[in-house]
Amino acid sequence: MSWVLLRGLTREARHWGGLPQQLAGLPGAGQVVTLDLPGNGVFHRQLSPASVRGIMALARHQLQAQGVAPPWNLLAMSLGGMVATDWAQQHPQEVHRLVLINTSMRPFSPVTERLRPGNWPALALLAARWHNADPTERTIHRLTCNNTSSREADIAAWVHIRQTAPVSPGNAWRQLLAAAQFSSGPQAPHCPTLVLSSSADRLVNPRCSHRVADAWQAPHHSHPWAGHDLPHDDAGWVCRQLARWLAEA
């Protein structure tokens, strides 16, 4: 059964780093598909919808167009986690398992937890110099990554991604609007769900993940030091949690 990976706001498949390869190495992992959301990556020229439902519909269409047959295991972080949640709630027959990493959503968390107010000035500056690749990616790295051992190589790679598949300011804004407005349906997804979070997430309050897991009575594991981009900071830990969860099932 295929694993489908969905990244977050303005990020694309190449931002997963080594996680897809590590995930593919798990016993019985099957095919691993890194699907770009509309407006990002290979779809960066496409208009990004201003709603999670619209993003989900286009992502679903793109996956079907690739000939990857459902049901799928969805692994998603941040905005991708909202898209995956909506997918599982709207099309339960298509989602076999759901893994959410550092996501947040209404009605479980207020805006001040979903995006820490201390970062609002930095994000406003980020928007103002969106086309200046190096300082923009340095700011994103500072806000989302606590593992700085490969910072310069990361930034060089991310600048290259920005130069080869630039996300427009309009698409970035529409994705932010979609994330801000999204509210989960009243019922938990019918599929088995795992929640992973970072205790040291400086962008999104980790309480957001705790509340989702509590509301859905889903297993939840928290990384002790990683930042918001948990797959970047410790992909091995993510895969170990997945392997343990699948073995228990």
Image (spheres, grey):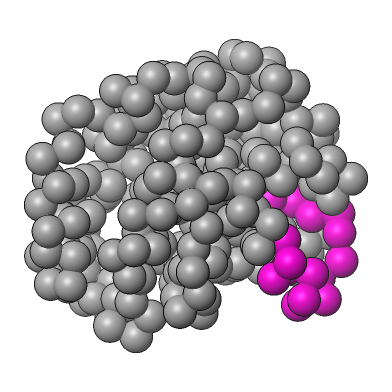
Q: Looking at the rendering, which quadrant does residue 171 occupy?
A: bottom left
Residue situated in front as seen by the camera: 141 or 123 = 123
Q: Position of residue 121 (x, y in %)?
A: 10, 40
Q: Does the magenta stretch include residue 17?
A: no
The picture places residue 180, in percent across and down from the top left corner, at 42, 37
Query: The C terminus appears in which quarter of the rendering?
Result: top right
Please tell me in which quadrant of the rendered image residue 126 appears: bottom left
Seen in the picture, residue 31 relative to 230 is either above or below; the reply is below
Is 66 magenta? The answer is yes
Left or right for 17, reference 161 = right
The quadrant in which the N terminus is found is bottom right
- Using residue 120 as the reference point, say whether residue 21 is left or right of it: right
* Residue 72 visible here: yes
The residue under the point 77% across, 76% down is 65
In the image, residue 133 above or below residue 9 = below
Question: Residue at position x 28%, y 37% from top?
Answer: 203
Q: Could you tell whether 230 is left or right of 236 in the image? A: left
Magenta part of the chain: 60-74
The one nearer the camera, 8 or 202, is: 8
- Residue 144 position, x and y percent, is 28, 47
- The answer to whether 21 is drawn above or below residue 77 in the figure is below
Which image quadrant for residue 128?
bottom left
Residue 239 visible? The answer is no
Q: Which residue is drawn at 57% across and 47% down?
A: 52
